[in-house]
Image (cartoon, rainbow, N blue to C red):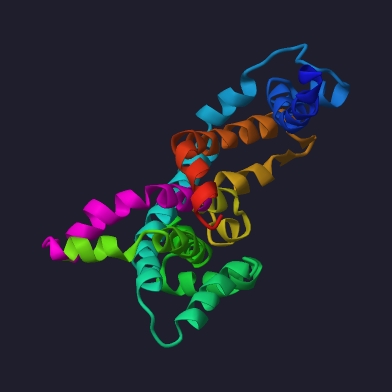
């Protein structure tokens, strides 16, 4: 009986992993074999799809562009959200609750609403088709999310910690970086994880605000059509490679995420 209790969980995990396995399976096939019939493993194993991605600048530059603006956005979002979340957590001022709700309302809006204004604005100031343009655009959604997450963690830290540090002669910057931030490291990990994930998978703004030089991999993957149809093997290989950055981030912040779900508002 104890073994049978774990059977539903095992079946559920297999169900979740099946699409990933099938994506990897397709990535080692040719398009003709994919369209030729159903098979659980490649009959004509090939690495040509991955070879093309790593040798064609159109493909590997897409990964570089995506990682560039995602990292930039995560750093900017956390840097801006930390002092903002501290202010919401420690101080009370007129309109603080309304301002906090307004920040969250930006996160609720669909990216399509802001695509045209961002496009016109960045074209006018010369930021169009740069990773910085996409990073700034994603800040509109990620900073409110980061503030909301971090404010929950900061509110869980007793105010007496601040007062004790001031009595001991700590300046605010020294207290904030040496004492306060280590106490909310779990919250920073959770906020960074969600900022990274949103920016990595978001397509509409990334595609609208770039053309050639800063084209992300998600937009490059939509251009695999040819006169003979879609290059399914190449598309599967590109999709398999897009999983790696997210998996790496999850590996490094896995402990923080576990604590975050237990202690924060997420």
Q: Residue furthest bottom?
A: 94
Position in image of residue 74 (x %, y %): 43, 53
Residue 21 among those drawn in magenta: no
Position in image of residue 8 (x %, y %): 80, 28
Q: Is residue 196 visible?
A: no
Choose between 88 and 72: the one closer to the eye: 88
Identify whether 32 is placed above or below 236: above
Identify whether 106 is placed above or below 186: below
Residue 189 among those drawn in magenta: yes
What is the total number of numbered labels drawn onto the structure image? 0
Position in image of residue 59 (x %, y %): 55, 37
Q: Residue furthest left?
A: 169
Residue stretch in magenta: 167-194
Position in image of residue 21 (x %, y %): 71, 25
Q: Is residue 64 left or right of residue 21?
A: left
The quarter of the rendered structure image containing the C terminus is bottom right
Q: Residue placed at 59% from the left, 25% from the top?
A: 50
Choose between 69 and 266: the one closer to the eye: 266
Helix, strand or loop: magenta stretch = helix
Q: Residue placed at 51% from the left, 62% from the top?
A: 145
Choose between 5 and 219: the one closer to the eye: 5
Q: Is residue 222 left or right of residue 94?
A: right
Place residue 244 in its image quadrant: top right
The quarter of the rendered structure image containing the N terminus is top right
Q: Is residue 19 visible?
A: yes
């Amino acid at each position: 009986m104890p073994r049978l209790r774990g059977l539903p969980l095992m079946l559920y995990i297999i169900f979740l992993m099946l699409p990933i396995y099938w994506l990897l399976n397709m990535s080692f096939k040719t398009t003709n074999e994919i369209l030729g019939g159903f098979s659980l493993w490649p009959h004509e194993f090939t690495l040509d799809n991955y070879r093309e991605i790593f040798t064609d600048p159109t493909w590997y530059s897409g990964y570089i562009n995506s990682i560039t603006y995602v990292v930039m956005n995560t750093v900017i979002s956390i840097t801006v959200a930390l002092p903002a979340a501290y202010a919401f957590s420690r101080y009370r001022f007129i309109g603080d609750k309304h301002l906090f709700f307004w920040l969250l309302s930006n996160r609720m809006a669909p990216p399509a609403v802001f695509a045209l204004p961002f496009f016109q604005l960045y074209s006018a100031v010369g930021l169009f088709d740069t990773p910085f343009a996409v990073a700034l655009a994603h800040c509109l959604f990620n900073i409110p999310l980061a503030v909301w997450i971090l404010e929950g963690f900061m509110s869980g830290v007793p105010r007496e910690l601040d007062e004790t540090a001031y009595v001991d002669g700590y300046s605010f910057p020294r207290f904030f970086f040496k004492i306060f931030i280590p106490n909310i490291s779990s919250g920073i990990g959770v906020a960074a994880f969600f900022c990274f994930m949103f920016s990595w998978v978001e397509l509409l703004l990334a595609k609208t605000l770039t053309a050639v030089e800063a084209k992300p991999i998600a937009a490059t993957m939509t251009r695999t059509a040819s006169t003979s149809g879609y290059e399914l093997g190449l598309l599967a290989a590109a999709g398999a490679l897009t999983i790696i950055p997210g998996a790496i981030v999850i590996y490094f912040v896995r402990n923080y995420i576990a604590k975050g779900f237990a202690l924060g508002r997420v």
